[in-house]
C-alpha cells in the first residue's frame, strides 16, 4: 500500500509550551512541530520565526500577553520557509514595526516564495491552521547582509547570518549576556533535519560558528529547548551527524552510478538506524535524499520544490518500496 503523501495523514494536534529560558528569553515549542523564540524586553518584544498563519500567531500573542503588554516590535525570519514566515501579519495589530531577514532569505522569497507556500501547505496541512487567513507572502521590511544589532531596554540582541546550512540565508538570534541562541532549523533536537533546500557541504562549518559563540541554551528549529551546555553540545553533534551522514551516503550513491530509488535505499542503510525514530523523519527523508543526490552531483543551488515536483518525487520513490 502506498504511503499517504508526505505528512497529509498527520492530524495529531501537538501541545504547545511557553517556557522561560533566561531573564528575557523564552521558547515556544510544540512536541516536534516548528518552534518559535521570544525575547521580552522592558520596552518591546522580539519574535524569532512568525509561525505559519496569522491565526496561529494569536496563540503566541496570548502567551506573551500573560507576561507583558509591551509592543511586539520585531519579527525575525530565520529563513524563508512558509511554516516559519507566513504568520507575520498576525503581529501588525500588536505593534510590529520591522520584519527582519537576511539578504539570502529575501532572495529566496523572491525566487521561490510562492512555490514554497503551496508546496509546504500540501505536504503538511496540519501545520497551517486557518491557511485562508494568510494574506500572501511575507516580505521583510529590513534586510541585512551579515549582522544587525538591536537593543531591547539595553539587552544586546545580535541577528546574524553566520553561514549557510538549512538554506542559503539562515539567520540566528543571539543574546550574549544570557548565552541564549535561537538557531532556527540550523539545529534540531530529536527531529529530522529537513535538507530539501540545504547547502549540505557548508552546514558543518556553520555549526562550528554556532559552537564558537559558546551558547548555554538553544531553541532549535524543532524539538525541546536545549537548556544546558551539555544538551547544547549534544544537539550540535546530532545535527552534524545527520547532515554529514546524509551527504556522505549520497556521494557514495552518485559515485556508484545509482538512480534516485537506489540512492534512497543506500542512504537508508546509514540513516535509519541512527535517526529512524525521530520526529518527521519519514516526511523529510525523500526530500533530503533528493537534495543530497543533487548536491553530490554538482547542483549547488537547490532546485525549486513545487507542489507538482513534490508529488512526482514522492510517488516515484514509493512505487518501488
Image: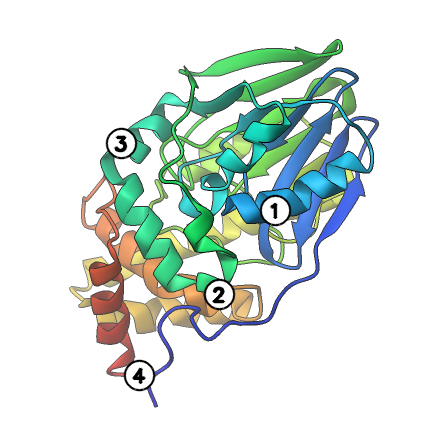
Instruction: Tell me the CA gap for discs 2 and 3.
Output: 29 Å
Query: Does 175 appear above or below 6?
Result: above
From the top left corner, tell me how far across and down residue 83 is, in percent.
46, 48
Q: Earlier in the sequence, mark 3 or mark 1?
A: 1
Q: Residue at x 65, y 31 (%)?
A: 181
Secondary structure, mark 1, is strand
Q: Nearer the viewer, residue 249 or 56?
A: 56
Secondary structure beneath dot 3 equals: helix
Q: Residues within 10 Å of mark 2 (few under 14, many from 20)?
A: some
Report the residue marked by disc 4: 321
Q: Secondary structure at mark 2?
A: helix
The residues tagged by marks 2 and 4 sit, at their Cα atoms, a distance apart of 16 Å
Contact flag, marks 3 and 4 (Cβ < 8 Å): no
Q: How far is disc 3 from disc 1 in space, using C-alphas?
A: 24 Å
Q: Where does residue 146 sit, x and y in percent of width and height?
A: 44, 16
Asked if residue 294 shows in the view, the reply is yes
The tag on residue 281 is 2
Residue under pointer 1:
35
Q: Is residue 208 left or right of residue 156?
A: left
Residue 85 percent coordinates (x, y): 46, 39
Mark 3 in CB contact with mark 1 (< 8 angstroms): no
Which comes before the other along the chain, label 2 or label 4?
A: 2
Residue plotted at (36% across, 37% down): 137
Q: Which residue is mark 3?
A: 110
Amino acid at each position: 500500500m502506498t504511503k499517504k503523501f508526505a505528512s497529509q495523514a498527520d492530524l495529531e494536534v501537538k501541545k504547545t509550551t511557553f517556557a522561560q529560558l533566561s531573564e528575557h528569553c523564552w521558547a515556544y515549542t510544540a512536541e516536534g512541530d516548528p518552534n518559535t523564540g521570544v525575547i521580552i524586553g522592558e520596552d518591546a518584544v522580539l519574535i524569532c520565526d512568525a509561525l505559519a498563519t496569522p491565526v496561529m500567531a494569536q496563540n503566541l500573542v496570548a502567551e506573551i500577553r500573560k507576561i507583558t503588554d509591551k509592543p511586539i516590535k520585531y519579527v525575525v525570519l530565520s529563513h524563508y520557509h512558509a511554516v516559519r514566515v507566513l504568520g507575520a501579519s498576525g503581529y501588525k495589530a500588536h505593534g510590529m514595526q520591522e520584519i527582519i531577514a537576511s539578504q539570502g532569505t529575501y532572495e529566496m522569497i523572491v525566487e521561490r516564495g510562492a512555490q514554497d507556500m503551496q508546496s509546504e501547505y500540501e505536504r503538511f496541512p496540519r501545520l497551517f491552521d486557518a491557511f485562508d487567513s494568510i494574506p500572501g507572502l511575507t516580505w521583510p521590511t529590513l534586510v541585512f547582509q551579515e549582522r544587525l544589532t538591536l537593543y531591547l531596554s539595553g539587552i544586546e540582541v545580535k541577528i546574524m547570518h553566520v553561514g549557510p546550512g538549512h538554506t542559503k540565508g539562515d539567520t540566528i538570534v543571539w543574546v550574549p549576556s544570557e548565552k541564549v541562541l535561537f538557531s532556527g532549523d540550523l539545529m534540531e533536537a530529536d527531529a529530522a533535519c529537513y535538507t530539501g533546500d540545504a547547502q549540505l557541504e557548508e552546514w558543518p562549518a556553520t555549526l562550528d560558528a554556532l559552537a564558537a559563540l559558546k551558547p548555554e541554551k538553544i531553541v532549535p528549529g524543532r524539538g525541546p529547548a536545549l537548556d544546558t551546555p551539555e544538551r547544547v553540545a549534544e544537539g550540535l553533534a546530532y545535527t552534524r551527524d545527520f547532515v554529514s551522514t546524509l551527504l556522505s551516503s549520497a556521494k557514495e550513491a552518485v559515485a556508484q552510478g545509482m538512480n534516485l530509488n537506489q540512492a534512497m535505499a543506500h542512504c537508508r542503510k546509514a540513516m535509519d538506524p541512527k535517526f529512524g525514530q525521530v520526529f518527521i523523519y519519514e516526511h523529510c527523508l525523500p526530500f533530503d535524499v533528493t537534495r543530497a543526490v543533487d548536491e553530490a552531483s554538482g547542483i549547488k543551488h537547490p532546485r525549486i520544490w513545487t507542489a507538482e515536483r513534490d508529488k512526482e518525487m514522492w510517488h516515484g520513490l514509493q512505487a518501488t518500496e
